[in-house]
Image (cartoon, rainbow, N blue to C red):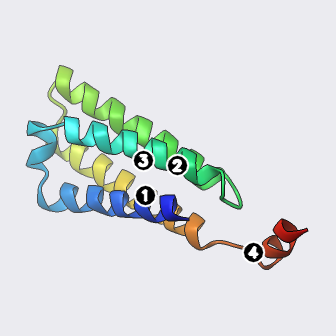
Amino acid sequence: MIANVLNTLVGLWLAYVSIFALSSAVTTPWRFIVAALVIIVLAVLARRSDYSGWQSATNIVLALVLAFLMLAEYVVAVPTLVLFWLILWIGLTVASSALWAALYHPEGSAEESTV
């Protein structure tokens, strides 16, 4: 659960940066590569305790897309509008799915885990 909460915060940070400080994506793309690695590590840790694994799998795929986007920024100049939308939606989706995974515990799962 803690890994999902931390992933939620990383996703919200990505959304914040895409809206208010997008120039940092162009000048220091390594920060976003580190954020992608953090998302992957936290999603793998969260996968062990999640009720269903699709949320962490989604976060891993989105983190890989973010890392690929930032590596592409090193090679070619990715348009700022593309950076804005992709970073924003990746951040919002990572935050939403991680929070969903942290909060979603069906009634029957507590009884099943004790048996």
Which residue type carries mark 4? Pro
Spatial CA span between label 1 and label 3: 6 Å
Do callouts 2 and 1 mark residues in contact (Cβ within 8 Å)?
yes
Which residue type carries mark 2? Ala
Which residue type carries mark 1? Asn
Do callouts 2 and 4 mark residues in contact (Cβ within 8 Å)?
no
Spatial CA span between label 4 and label 1: 21 Å
User: Which label is found at residue 99?
Assistant: none
Q: Mark 2 or mark 1: name the one nearer the start of the chain.
A: 1
Relative side of 115 to 77, left or right? right
**Residue pushed farthest bottom?**
107
Check disc 3 and report the residue beneath it. Answer: 39
Check disc 4 and report the residue beneath it. Answer: 106
Question: Where 94 falls versus 27 (above or below)?
Answer: below
User: Which label is found at residue 7?
Assistant: 1
Q: Mark 2 or mark 4: name the one nearer the start of the chain.
A: 2
| Residue at figure coordinates x 36%, y 63% from the top left | 9
Name the spot of residue 11 as percent of width and height, x first.
36, 58
Which residue type carries mark 3? Ile
